[in-house]
Image (cartoon, rainbow, N blue to C red):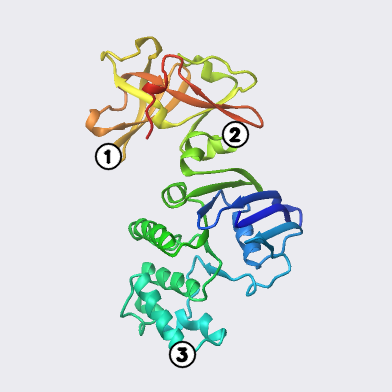
């Protein structure tokens, strides 16, 4: 592994920001640290950069323990949420700043800045100041500045949080392409699930100072391993006390009384249509229907349970008050420690559908 954390602890008073954290990241990967506020993800980033010192445990980069190395000695590139550009420096001087500190020659600096401006798609803007740039352009300059010193690792702390939604989506794709082109091991902090899934090669989910699960976006999304991940990833409805056993096709699973059901696991058809597996469909009534662009978000009462579903508008419009037929294809059940995936007994793997 190129980056490793081994039994790392970090407390701020009584608050455990990192509680026996261990994980490894391969060289060249783009990894997302995903979790709610206060889960410890930014602390992990800052400890790797040397901006915070862990209380115990080891942090290594490329096989070298960096516990006692300064920020500069760790050769880390850092992109901050608020860009942290010098407002009275031009784009050129902002990018060149780290190289000047390291006493690089003027010719080398000029060549490097030109290369980086081409890389980030901002050629010809070297004489502008940050207030003359858009938010997306400023973030690209921050990215170029971080790369100018040829870091071993690139760290990004919620890099798109200060950018509007449309530009943020464009920058996600751009970041992924740039990291792949440069080949630098990169870690970014986010609380946005869509961002993590779209951009990252791997996702590390944090909660209460601990690593809940690490894997590819597909692994994290389809196969949550802990109760927290099962509930945190996606938009789940939580059922307790074996309520999920009231849904046709499911039975109580060992000592796992709780279940999380995502909207995409709920199949909805109008009352009167012939479903493919009639024995596991149940009647429900639509309590709420909200238009969401390409789909309608449904809240459906089935017996004494309320389920959430998402129905594409090209499959027909379902309105509040309509009677419908409902089938749950799969769900996640969990005890205090572990999450398990249950598939409706009427289905086999060939019939599963994913979104």
Disc marking residue 46: none
Q: Position of residue 196 (x, y in %)?
A: 47, 50
Q: Quadrant of the C terminus?
A: top left
Distance between mark 2 and mark 3 Cα atoms: 55 Å
Q: In the depicted view, which residue is nearer to us: 336 or 345? A: 345
| Foreground disc of the pair 2, 1 | 2
* Point 37% across, 19% down: residue: 326
Q: Residue beneath label 3, please?
A: 106
Corner quadrant of residue 315? top left
How many residues crowd around disc 2 within 10 Å: few (fewer than 14), some, or many (20 or more)?
A: many
Around disc 3, counting alpha carbons within 10 Å, would you say few (fewer than 14), some (14 to 19), or many (20 or more)? few
Q: Secondary structure at mark 3?
A: helix
Q: Which residue is mark 2?
A: 227
Pointer 3 or 1: first along the chain? 3
Q: Which mark is residue 294?
A: 1
User: Quick check: 286 above or below 136?
Assistant: above
Residue name at image x 27 percent, y 39 percent: 294
Residue in the picture at 50% in, 59% down: 158
Q: Quadrant of residue 306?
A: top left
Does residue 29 appear to the left or right of 209 in the view shown?
left
Q: Which of the two labelled residues, at mark 2 and mark 3, occupies the earlier sequence position?
A: 3
Left or right for 236, reference 321: right
């Amino acid at each position: 592994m190129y980056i490793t954390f081994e039994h790392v602890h970090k407390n701020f008073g009584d608050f455990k920001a990192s509680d026996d954290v261990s994980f490894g990241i391969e060289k060249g990967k783009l990894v997302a640290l995903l979790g709610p506020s206060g889960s410890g993800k930014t602390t992990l980033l800052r400890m790797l950069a040397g901006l915070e010192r862990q209380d115990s445990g080891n942090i290594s980069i490329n096989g070298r323990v960096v516990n006692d190395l300064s920020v500069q000695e760790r050769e880390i590139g850092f992109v901050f949420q608020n860009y942290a550009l010098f407002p009275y420096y031009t784009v050129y001087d902002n990018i060149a700043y780290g190289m000047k500190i390291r006493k690089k020659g003027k010719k080398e600096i000029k060549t490097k800045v030109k290369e980086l401006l081409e890389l980030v798609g901002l050629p010809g803007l070297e004489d502008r100041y940050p207030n003359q740039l858009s938010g997306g352009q400023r973030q690209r300059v921050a990215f170029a500045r971080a790369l100018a010193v040829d870091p071993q690792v690139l760290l990004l702390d919620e890099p798109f949080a200060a950018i509007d939604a449309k530009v943020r989506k464009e920058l996600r794709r751009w970041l992924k392409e740039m990291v792949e082109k440069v080949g630098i091991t990169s870690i970014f902090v986010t609380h946005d699930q869509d961002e993590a899934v779209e951009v990252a090669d791997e996702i590390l989910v944090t909660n209460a100072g601990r690593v809940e699960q690490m894997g590819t976006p597909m692994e994290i999304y389809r196969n949550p391993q802990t109760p927290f991940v099962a509930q945190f990833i996606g938009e789940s409805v939580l059922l307790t006390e074996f309520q999920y056993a009231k849904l046709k096709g499911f039975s109580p699973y060992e000592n796992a009384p709780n279940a999380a059901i995502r909207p995409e696991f709920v199949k909805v058809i109008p009352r009167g249509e012939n479903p493919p597996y009639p024995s596991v469909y149940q009647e429900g009534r639509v309590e709420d229907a909200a238009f969401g662009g390409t789909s309608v978000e449904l809240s459906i009462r089935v017996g004494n349970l309320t389920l959430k579903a998402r129905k594409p508008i090209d499959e027909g419009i379902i309105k509040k008050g309509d009677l419908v037929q409902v089938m749950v294809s799969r769900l996640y059940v969990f005890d205090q420690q572990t999450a398990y995936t249950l598939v409706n007994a009427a289905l086999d793997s060939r019939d599963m559908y994913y979104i």
